[in-house]
Image (spheres, grey):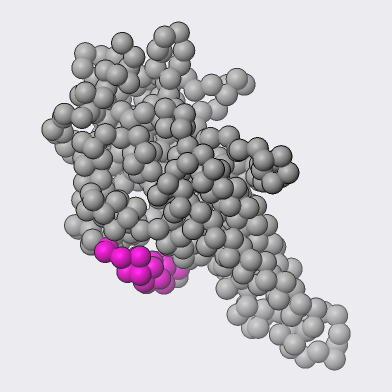
Amino acid sequence: MALLQSIEPLAAAFTPAEPAPALPAARPPHRIATDAEALAAAQRYAARIAPGAAQRDRERLLPWEALDDFVAIGLWSITVPREYGGPGVSAGTLAEVTALVSAADGSIGQIPQNHFYALEVLRVGGTDAQKRFFYGRVLAGDRFGNALAEIGHQDFQRRTRLVPDGEGFRVQGRKFYCTGALYAHWIPTLVVAREGGRDVTYLAFVPRTAEGVHVTDDWDGFGQRVTGSGSVQFDDVRVEAEWVVPFLASFERPTTIGPLAQILHAAIDLGLARGALAATLPFVREHARPWIDARVERAADDPLLIQQVGETAVRLRAAEALVRRAGRFVDAAQADPTEQRVAEASIAVAEARALTTTASLDAGTRLFELGGTSATTGQKGLDRFWRNARTHTLHDPVRWKYHAIGNFHLNGRIPPRHGAI
């Protein structure tokens, strides 16, 4: 019997015993009710965390208190569907919330990306009982991290195994780039099980406190420094059948798992671009000096400087428009996930992602160019915008976005179904 067939009856009928979380919520989260409330909460939260962003980046101060606040105001549960007690906000609202937080602190903006990704996998492939349990945990304040990527294998095949153990399973393997796992109560983990002579992929929700789970804070990127993107080792870790959700099967039909994941990445880059431009304007007004024409007394009156600021602002506004447009396509595909609608959503998000990549890198670079050498001094922390953008935009190659876009428009080719498109 296939593993999926053995899991589904158990998952559909279980009454879960809730494991003690590693990181209990600081206080019961607020229940956000509407998209407008989510956006207002994100604006207030961004204003609170922005003043400490440079110090957190410079000293690599892990943002435990800020994350507790992020959860407590209700923003980590905004994609929980209404029928399960959440507000079920639109993809556009989710993207804008992410962008607002990322503009204030790019690392904190990225931490919940895989949390929302796991919730979408659950929405698409989970049973009703699984949804009630895990959505309930999120509404109670639990955070999901991730353990998806593996490195060191030239064949790119995952080797983290899901092995039957009585009515449950054991997980064995090692993961890298596990953004958010350090801060998580649950670590959704991509695992493979041998079925019918082939490997089938599942997403196992592993409790952070389970015996054999080892999270190592070994992320040392020069940007996005406090995302907690370290490594996770699973040494014969026990998981229950009801914690295992189909993953590969979710891509055998059109779903919005990929577009939702990617619009969040686009939103992070959009936020980084906004943050860089917002930091550029006052710094140039106060510190920069004209360098071309001695007749120009103030940098803010330098026509070449003004032109560059205008160019950056136009690119940013275009990126914002594409992200909003992509959100509408994702919403339409979630409501009616036909092959064509999901393909259109994937392409719309890829178009947004391509431009937010350019906008974030350009805005960070212009901050250096217009601010001069004084903009690079470490105490001010202005260099973090470019470092964060350069690090995050490497998540998956933008050149493949252009390839998918061109192939769709020129040849009518439907993009592949996976989390990177």
Please, what is the dominant secondary structure of the magenta stretch? helix
Residue 59: x percent and y percent?
Answer: 48, 56
Q: Quadrant of the C terminus?
A: top right
Q: Is residue 318 above or below residue 400?
A: below
The magenta segment: 32-50
- Pick the front one: 98 or 302: 98
Residue drawn at the location 41% of the way across and 44% of the way down: 117
Where on the picture, by quarter, is residue 372? bottom right
Is 35 rendered above or below residue 306? Answer: above
Nearest the eye: 417 or 305? 417
- Asked where in the image residue 275 lies, by quadrant, the reply is bottom right
Let me know if residue 224 appears in the view. Answer: no
Residue occupying the point 32% across, 55% down: 88
Q: Position of residue 165 (x, y in %)?
A: 25, 14
* Looking at the image, residue 235 lies above or below residue 131: above
Q: Residue at x 45, y 68 (%)?
A: 50
Position of the N terminus, as image quadrant, is: top left
In the rendered structure, the answer to whether residue 196 lies left or right of residue 10 reads right
Which residue is most to the top? 197
Identify which residue, 25 or 393, lies in the foreground: 393
Is residue 299 at least partly visible in the picture? yes
Task: Give the residue at x 70% y 75%.
Answer: 309
Judge left or right: residue 56 versus residue 377. left
Where residue 13 appears, as percent x and y from the top left, is: 16, 29
